[in-house]
Image (cartoon, helix red, strand yellow):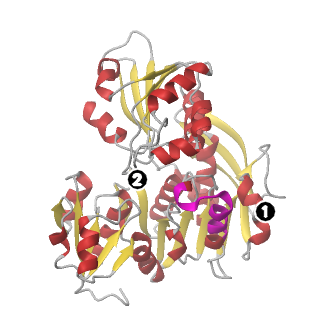
Amino acid sequence: MYGINKNLQLHFIGIGGIGMSGIAEVLLNLGYKVSGSDLNKSPVVGRLEGLGAQIFQGHKKENVRDADIVIYSSAVVATNPEVVGAKEKKIPIIKRAEMLAELMRLKFGIAVAGSHGKTTTTSFLATILSSLNFKPTYIVGGVVKNLGSNAGMGEGEYLVAEADESDGSFLHLNPIISVITNIDNDHMDYYKDESTLVQAFVDFANKIPFYGHLVINGHDEKLGKSIGKLKRPFITFGIEGKELAVETLDYTASELKKEGEFLSFVLNCDSESGKFRIRMHGEHNALNAMGAIIVAHKLGASFKDIAQSIEGFEGVGRRLEILRDQDNVMVIDDYGHHPTEISATLNAIENRYEDCELNVIFQPHRYSRSKTHWEEFVEVLTRDFNVYILPIFAAGEEPISYIDSEVMVKKINESGGNAHYIDDLDSMKDSLVSKSNSKKLFLTLGAGSIGRQIRELL
């Protein structure tokens, strides 16, 4: 890599994290010396170790003794022993996005941003370009099942990556094509107010060069209101009959239908029309697919070829992932942790599995997010089916008075819902793993430990 000597030791704090591991894997495949630490040994960490990474279990100052550059993510706090150790040794400490920006600088960069749907959209695009022999390098915030990993090193000129807005670090990236799926009020502990959040996305949008492409969701209200601030030409996409936030659509989807395990739709633009089928349900996933389709189309692929390649997409880990389907019991796991995501997921589930008795198990993520969106969580979880709520996953935050799951359960039930507080998943074990006389579906939701716990339990 130009600018970084391959003899330097690159050390990742929390190397097993889904965003960190993808960059580490690409660097290993490029021949760089990589080390990293993580609290737990996991399949992801084992994969990196197999590729040649030096792995330390746990975070200790001595882990960085041979490091020349230390990379960290927004999940790593300033008091982390390795951060402290690096500062004491005057080792450069950079954000994950800065290292991703170095990789992107050497390729034709394609970045997918948005409050919701960016992992799925990036995964769709990596699948399409890989299938059509573009040989892309890709770094995704989830394991793409049909590609077998969250990252891959390709020989082609394109690098497809997810752009993380959580701490503003996506502004380090300089892509040639950008997709923005939507803008929603999330990570307000960092942005503080909506105008700062929206401006960050506008600044990201304006980073593409004059010859690049900006692809945006034509239904998103905050994007629509920001049109006047965009300094680059943009391409809009959306669904026919759905309320628009922009004047016109450049790509329009119509005829959305369930076809067994598939969702089908027809996509039209001035030059072409085609039918697409994806193995995911919900309007939000149709929009995610469209963002990816449009990028591939702009790179020269035909609708016909894209349609064939996208049918091979098998989904992303923790995005409506089916973990069990036997004895009349289905268990589906999803990363949804924001009220907007939960609403979209529940709509997709209810439309797809109309004949099942639905039960939702939710682990709220962060006290700050729970406080910011308290009323929205209560509203979206006020349902006529059973909702089980686990203790809030702190993610390193200190508790906030009166912001807890038991109070949330009380408020949901006062609103007419059917919520129950549970201390842990083990209390649901009999329901999750036993036979049932009628069809039951259990949906686990959350960005904390619930994904790992449900897999261990099953």
Q: Are marks 1 and 2 in contact (CB under 8 Å)?
A: no
User: Which is more toward the observer, 418 or 373?
Assistant: 373
Q: Which residue: 28% across, 78% down?
A: 87
Q: Which residue in the structure is indicated by mark 1?
A: 270
Q: The residue under label 2 is which amino acid type?
A: Val
Separation (CA) of disc 1 from disc 2:
32 Å
Which quarter of the figure is the C terminus placed in?
top left
Classify 15 as above or below 351: below
Packing grade of label 1 (10 A; few <14, some 14-19, many >=20) is: few
User: Which is more toward the observer, 354 or 129?
Assistant: 354
Residue 252 visible somewhere in the drawing: no
Residue 232 visible somewhere in the drawing: yes
Q: The residue under label 1 is which amino acid type?
A: Asp
* Location of residue 35 in the rendering, given as x and y in whole percent from the top left corner: 21, 71
- What is the span of residues highlighted in magenta in the rendered image? 189-202
Q: Which residue in the structure is indicated by mark 2?
A: 144
Q: Earlier in the sequence, mark 1 or mark 2?
A: 2
* Location of residue 74 in the rendering, given as x and y in whole percent from the top left corner: 41, 63
Q: Is residue 201 left or right of residue 58?
A: right
Classify 80 as above or below 256: below
User: Which is more toward the observer, 308 or 170?
Assistant: 170
Which quarter of the figure is the N terminus placed in?
bottom left
Q: Which residue: 49% across, 43% down?
A: 337
Q: Which dot, 1 or 2, sits closer to the camera?
A: 2
Q: Which residue: 28% across, 58% down?
A: 16
